[in-house]
Image: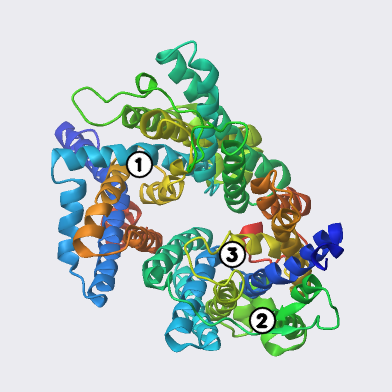
Amino acid sequence: MAAEIDISSVASATRRFTLLRVQEELARRLEPVAITFLAILAGMGLFSLFLLALGKSPVQFVQLIYAGGFGTWFSLQNAFSRAAPLLLTALCVALPARLGLTVIGGEGALALGGLGAAAIAVPMLSVSHGWPLWIAMGASGAVVGGLWIAFAGALKHYRGVNETISSLLLTYIGIAVMNHLIEGVLRDPASLNKPSTFPLPADAMFGKIWGMDVHWGFAIGIICCLLAWVLIERTTIGFAARVSGGNLRAAQIQGLPVGKLIVGFTFLAGAFAGLAGMIEVAAVQGSANGSIIAGYGYTGILVAFLARHNPLAIIPVSILLGGVAAAGGLIQRRMGLPDATVLVLQGTLFISVLFFETLYGRFKLFNPEMWQITRLGKDGQ
Amino acid sequence: MEETALGLWGVPLAILAGAIRVSTPFIFVSLGETLTERSGRINLGLEGTLVFGAMSAYAVAVLTQSAWLGVLAAMCAGAVFGLLHGFICKFPKVNDIAIGIAMMQFGLGLAFFLGKPFIQPVAPKLPSIPLGNWSSLPQVQAALTINVLFIVGLILTFAIAWMLKNTRIGLILRVVGDSSDAARAMGINPNTVRLLATAAGGALAAIGGAYLSLFYPGSWNERISSGQGLMAVALVIFARWNPKGCLFASLLFGGAGALGPALQSVGVTQGYYLFYAAPYVLTLIILIMTSSPTTRLSGAPEELSLTK
């Protein structure tokens, strides 16, 4: 009997096997999407209760967010522009997070990156008003921001200093350094009420993406997210980083260069935040001043956590929160709510998404291991 | 010429006065965080609790015209924030550090939101005790005008140190902080103890906020805190989870925070922002000096994720 193996039944078993593999893969990939979606719904639900308690209409709130952030081509472009710095500051949180580090100092790296970019623009303007200037500004901003966050990474690895606290302290210090310099040596004497660096002439500013009213910073942010995704998911360096993030001791035993990975990844993270500062200067403000400290670094933390530190997921989440920010003004005017409304919504979403972490591994639908257990159980009977 | 009689002696005096004035919020937040961390959990969100405490204290003080009712309201609000943090952290797979960051953003946002109508009105201030009447110099008198909350903070420091060492509650807190398993073996639910310790920590941190809005600087606005809630968390590490250490560290930080304004008062205006950043730099230096990459920090509760 054993000699007469039915070829077609083997083929169908193989097919069933591959189908199962596809199902398993799909289930694993859908779990974070479904849970994050549930978390956002729950957060919106809680926020709606808050609005109802204040006598405001949650329906109107959602309608205004849609109208102000996504409903029309105009508002969508506004969302894209607001998303540009968020893409980069979220990377500042997401990259170290893959190594198991919680870095929240993006705001400081952004401020100093913007300052570094504006500082190098002063001598560069006599040379160029185009690509060489932008490359120099971008490089300067990225290096300054990178060194700032890499310092927190190095302190973590070589001195065991908690990186969450040190990176936030570095943000306060960075903003103080920026204020010191824009009121001192880097100040444009013509900026009276609002201390600023020397402004870029109009022809040295970033233009708009073809056919859109969105500056090039948005495209740069998306490219950086794609590059970061390739680095983490498709290179050996990224693999080494993920191993270290999963189990630091195992990585050290395997001989992975954990110290270099930590310093390198935190440098890259800070470089992205610094680039966000450069974009704010070169595309929006025209000079480094207090306006670049607008909380993008803090919103970036939420973006990274919502995206579960996946650089590809950062793109839609940044656009989502960019749209919410873009609708902020409309919400203030139409509903008579203060500007901090968006902050309350962000905080609620943040708590909700972290709370829903507890649901991972609980749904049978998304966890193939549980299918196996049931199957084994049935076979045993 | 009473004002100039002090001359440059005004700087150390101003720093001493500033140390007492500026340190009070640090004392309360760091004592609160010590309680929470001794139970084995870290609440990084005390910056949000502090600012929300400042707002609720100011708002209630404006509405009731009583500063002490404001402090009470802040305590309740802080305890609620702590309960929320403790409740969420109870669930498996929830990261207490990340929740702290989220609570910080939530607390700040909610405080700015609800505090908008209270930026203009004037609230009654917390009382202070003039201890410098023996001197004829107005600077000395000003320096030795001690707020009641500072004295409460002093008493609380020693009370908490005594409680941790000598009482049943203190023992339970330490056991839970050092080993969840040992606590369970004793029939103690670690999650309940941590929930209560986080609530107590939140209430204390909110008193620190109430001090900011009701005494010094004594007004409510969105820039009321300059990171005291966060620095206090770093300060607890420096103080080795010891209440008396917290008091010493708070006074040190108060002095560092008073450096900028003190120098400004004698005409040194150069580098104002850098002196303003002195407490942050000091915190960072202290963290670098007291941390170690290889060994666990002495005095750290074993269950604390911060030092794992």
Q: Which quadrant is the C terminus of chain B positioned in?
A: bottom right
Q: Is residue B206 above or below residue B292?
A: below
Task: Quadrant for residue A26, please give it.
Answer: top left
Q: Which quadrant is the N terminus of chain B positioned in?
A: bottom right
Closer to the chain start, of discs 2 and 3, is 2
Badge 2 marks a residue whose secondary structure is: helix
Front: mark 2 or 1: 2
Q: Is residue B162 above or below residue B39?
A: below
Residue that numbered label 1 is attached to: A314
Chain containing mark 2? B
- Where in the figure is residue A210, as x and y percent of width and height? 22, 22
Q: Is residue A240 above or below residue A369?
A: above
Foreground of the two, A126 or A365: A126
Residue at 45 percent across and 13 percent down: it is: A132
Tell me how far mark 2 sits from mark 3, CA to CA.
17 Å
Report the side of A349 relative to A274 (left or right): left
Residue that numbered label 2 is attached to: B149
Chain containing mark 1? A
Badge 1 marks a residue whose secondary structure is: helix
The answer to whether residue A108 shows anywhere in this view is yes
- Where in the figure is residue A241, as x and y percent of width and height? 53, 36
